[in-house]
Amino acid sequence: MNTSGLSWTKRIAAVATLGDEHRRRIYEYVLGAGEAVSRDEAAGAMDLPRSTASFHLDRLVREGILRVEFRKPAHKAGPGSGRPSKLYSPDLQEVGASVPDRNYDLAGHLMAEAISRSTSEGVPVGAALLDVAEDQGRESGKPDDLLGALKELGYVPSADQSGGYRLLNCPFHRLSQEHEDVVCTMNGAFLRGVASGSGSRADCVVPDPGTGHCCARIAAMEDSAES
């Protein structure tokens, strides 16, 4: 997977971990190997002592960048070959983060899925985008924890004076500046799905025009009932 499935803090930590040249080179080696690799293989490929390679490999595992499996390599034979080896493979296919938190991968996924659905089902692409965004939003919700879901998705909810929440960050900011109608409509559908998937009413998501924040906010329930 890529880092879009991780929380913002974990993505930042992953990028920081790869700031070390040895770890970055080892990650790139494991990523390009095409199969799980051992500590000895990584050490040989990077021209590092086995202990150094092992240290960096295990650090990448702790950060969720690599994963470990224990098995006998197919090419291993001879005495002691029956014992499984500790092997490393990528848990993340790419590592990226931004400050503030943005999620352009998600926007790209939603738009590509909408075009695919529009083509296969013969529906307008705009309608397909709304359906796809709301479906994905429901999958991204957290049962009985709408605020927690919004925080994980990068919206930065902040209580307002009306009893609702303003969303201080837009994960699709740059796209929304260039394609406001499409992106803000998609974002609204996605947020309604998140609300539903978290056990809240979809109509708690209401427009919040202006600059410096998301184009939608979470209204107090009595406000949403009147909207």
Image (cartoon, grey):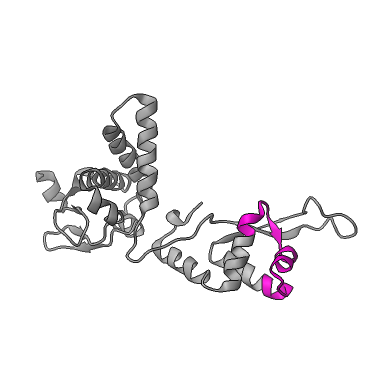
Picture quadrant of residue 128: top left
Q: How many numbered circles are shown?
A: 0
Assign the magenta stretch its main secondary structure: helix
Residue situated in front as seen by the camera: 146 or 55: 55
**Most distant residue in the right direction:** 79
The residue depicted at 30 percent of the width and 37 percent of the height is 129
The residue depicted at 49 percent of the width and 60 percent of the height is 95
| Residue 199 part of the magenta segment | no
**Most distant residue in the front direction:** 178
Task: Point out residue 75 in the picture as x, y percentages from the top left corner.
Answer: 81, 52
Task: Point out residue 201 in the picture as x, y percentages from the top left corner.
Answer: 23, 44
Residue bounds of the magenta highlight:
30-53
**Is 118 situated left or right of 160 in this image?**
right
Residue situated in front as seen by the camera: 32 or 150: 32
Residue situated in front as seen by the camera: 192 or 213: 213
**Is 31 situated left or right of 195 in this image?**
right
Residue situated in front as seen by the camera: 220 or 22: 22
Up-down: is 222 above or below 60?
above
Task: Point out residue 213 in the picture as x, y percentages from the top left corner.
Answer: 20, 60
Up-down: is 44 above or below 149?
below
Q: Which quarter of the image is occupied by the C terminus?
A: top left
**Is 185 situated left or right of 76 in this image?**
left
**Is 64 situated left or right of 34 in this image?**
left
The residue depicted at 15 percent of the width and 53 percent of the height is 208
The residue depicted at 46 percent of the width and 57 percent of the height is 3
Task: Point out residue 94 in the picture as x, y percentages from the top left corner.
Answer: 51, 57
